[in-house]
Image: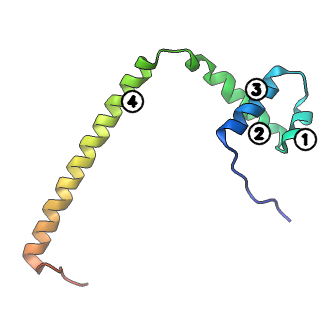
Amino acid sequence: MKRKRRNHSSEFKAKVALAALKGDRTLVELAEQFDVHPNQIQDWKKRVVESAGNLFSRGTESGGKNDEAMQALHAKIGQLTMENDFLERGLTRIHGPRGKKW
């Protein structure tokens, strides 16, 4: 019987990856201890090493990009809301307040 697919929390992944980075135990030992596949541990460890450079970067650099993206998304939401309201008013004029049932 297959094991049900599990979703691990980010805290658990970080704990396992840091244990793998310590290097005092093998991947097989860690896999038995944490009950995950060794390839999964290797993947989490690789992701921690790749993103380690971003940990100490200034928050304003990435924050500015996020703010710009957030403003663009809010503008798009506003545009779509206005278009939806406009089309709804037009449909009400054509088919009445309840609209036409297809």
Circle 4: residue type: Asn
Residue topped by disc 3: 18
Q: CA distance from mark 2 to mark 4?
A: 30 Å
Find disc 2 in the rendering and name its residue.
40
Residue 51 at x, y percent in the picture: 61, 24
Judged left or right of residue 101, residue 7 is right
Element assignment for label 3: helix
Q: Are marks 2 and 3 in contact (CB under 8 Å)?
A: no
Quarter occupied by the N terminus:
bottom right
Where residue 70 sits: x, y (%)? 34, 36
Kindly identify which residue carries mark 4. 66
Looking at marks 2 and 3 on the same chain, the residue that comes earlier in the sequence is marked by 3
Q: How is the image coloured?
A: rainbow
**How far separated are the C-alphas under marks 1 and 4?**
40 Å
CA distance separating discs 2 and 3: 13 Å
Residue 3, position in %: x, y?
A: 81, 59
Q: Earlier in the sequence, mark 1 or mark 2?
A: 1
4 over 41 or under it: above or below: below
Q: Which mark is residue 32?
A: 1
What residue sits 92% from the left and 34% below the top?
A: 29
